[in-house]
Image (spheres, rainbow, N blue to C red):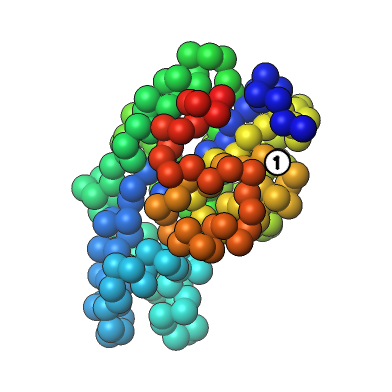
Amino acid sequence: MFHKPDIKLVIFDLDGTLIDAYRAIIRSFNYVMRKCNYPCQSGLVIRRAVGWGDSNLLAPFVDAGQLKKAVSLYRRHHKKSLLEDSRLLPGAKRVLNYLKARGYLLAVASNRPTKFSHILIRHLGLEKYFAYVLCADKLKEGKPHPEILNKIRKKFSLQKNEVLYVGDMVIDAQAGSRAGIRTIIVSGGSSTQSQIQKQRPWKIARRLSSLRKLL
């Protein structure tokens, strides 16, 4: 049974959970489509494809022989678009301040490449909150594989019942379940409500601010 005082570490996904970078992603994605002579995609199509890393984001839309070029173009453009078109989701800093003030360890587990995760974290003034940031490009497997969550938990020598994971996607629910960690999914990200419900995470929250009541 879950007891609130057991939690010592809260791990957050970035995109769609703490940060809204969808406009930046859509801009960079369609920049690549135009440069490589592919049709641009709607914001909704791109949004639903987000969460698996930039190579996996682009792979379904370009020929295999052009993927390396496409990723290079995307990353070059994205360094600028992230700074122009990313923002914190409502209540994100309030929640982080609340948790930090109460002594929780905070960490990030993201499928976004390390370089771009740190660009976002620095740009939005989040560095002071996180004791550790781990991204899928530093591992053999990204989410929904549980490796990223297991590595973070073990870094702090904690038991599974001492860790909470907060994400916004089906793959976050799957990663949390496979790691044996209680998981809260904040709806409104890349996955639909029905997709999230099918995964049966520990909790589904409409807003990130609900985390304050749960902890």
Image quadrant containing the N terminus: top right
Residue placed at 29% from the left, 67% from the top? 43
The image shows residue 131, relative to residue 67, as above or below, that is: above
Q: Residue reaching furthest left?
A: 84
Residue type highlighted by circle 1: Ile
Q: Quadrant of residue 123?
A: top left
x and y, in percent, of residue 100 in the image:
49, 19
Q: Which residue is drawn at 37% across and 25% down?
A: 94
Lateral position of residue 50 relative to residue 111, left or right: left
Q: Nearer the viewer, residue 81 or 188?
A: 188
- Residue 10 visible in the current orientation: yes
Q: Which residue is found at the position 38% from the left and 33% from the top?
A: 92
The residue to which callout 1 is attached is 181
Q: Position of residue 46 (x, y in %)?
A: 36, 68
Q: Position of residue 197 (x, y in %)?
A: 57, 57
Q: Quadrant of residue 142?
A: bottom right
Q: Judge the density around disc 1: few (<14), some (14-19), many (≥20) Cα neighbours within 10 Å.
A: many
Question: Is residue 139 shown to the viewer in this render?
Answer: no
